[in-house]
Image (cartoon, grey):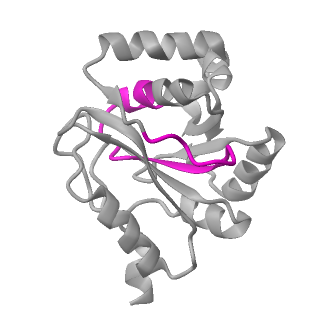
Amino acid sequence: MRIRHALAQAYWRVSRWSPDPTPPPPGGGGILIGAPHTSNWDFVIMLALAWHWGINVRWLGKDSLFKRPFGPVMRMLGGIPVHRENPAGLVDHIVDRVRQNGPTYLVITPEGSRSPVPYWKSGFYRIARETGMTVTLGFVDRRTMTTGLGPTLTMTGDVHSDMDAIRAFYAGMVGVRPGGERIPRLHAEDTQA
């Protein structure tokens, strides 16, 4: 942990970005949303923030990232490969993996892609509901050149209300690469209407 913290401090000294001073919530675990997700730099910033606060994170990545030669490094950094062509059972698999590692933050970028998408992927919501894990809203905001942790929420099952709270927090935030931000919305909000 000391080495990771030292690496994070070195990163913040040379980066134009800075960590928001809000500490992680007590308990040491839950779902940590990363948004807006517009650049590969989001990954570096997320690791620097996690190492700054000394929190254990696991994150989801497309399975191609876990092939040689980088696969072992990605796993060491907390990666969990996701096979996008066969998503059946993904939520159950992820919940099992996270529970094996004790208090952990599962980092999810619900946009699922750095490209513009009309809806967020609902996996974070399903995992939160099925496990009772809280959802902490992690952010990058190019306007202020800060990254950090926002409020921690409990998903109630009222999708519209829960997503309204998430939308309110992310309103106006700008990603590392401006212009790729999308309003947080789940497909279920439209199908329930």
Q: Quadrant of the N terminus?
A: top right
119 to 43, vertically: above or below: below
* Residue depicted at 36% across the width and 73% down the height: 164
* Residue depicted at 67% across the width and 20% down the height: 76
* Residue depicted at 74% across the width and 57% down the height: 92
Q: How many marks?
A: 0
Residue 12 location in percent, x, y?
A: 37, 17
Residue 120 visible in rendering: yes
25 to 193, vertically: above or below: above
Instruction: Confirm whether the magenta stretch covers residue 25.
Output: yes
21 or 79: nearer the eye?
21
Specify the quadrant of the image occupied by residue 69. top right
Q: Quadrant of the C terminus?
A: bottom left
126 or 10: nearer the eye?
10
Residue 91 location in percent, x, y?
A: 68, 57
Residue at the extreme right of the image, as rendered: 100
Residue at the extreme bottom of the image, as rendered: 193
Instruction: Confirm whether the magenta stretch covers residue 90.
Output: no
Residue 64 location in percent, x, y?
A: 55, 29
Residue 188 visible in rendering: no
84 to 193, vertically: above or below: above
Residue 105 location in percent, x, y?
A: 63, 43
* Residue depicted at 62% across the width and 45% down the height: 106
11 to 118, vertically: above or below: above
Left or right, residue 132 beside residue 190: right
Left or right, residue 178 beside residue 155: left
Q: Which range is magenta?
A: 22-46
185 or 136: nearer the eye?
136
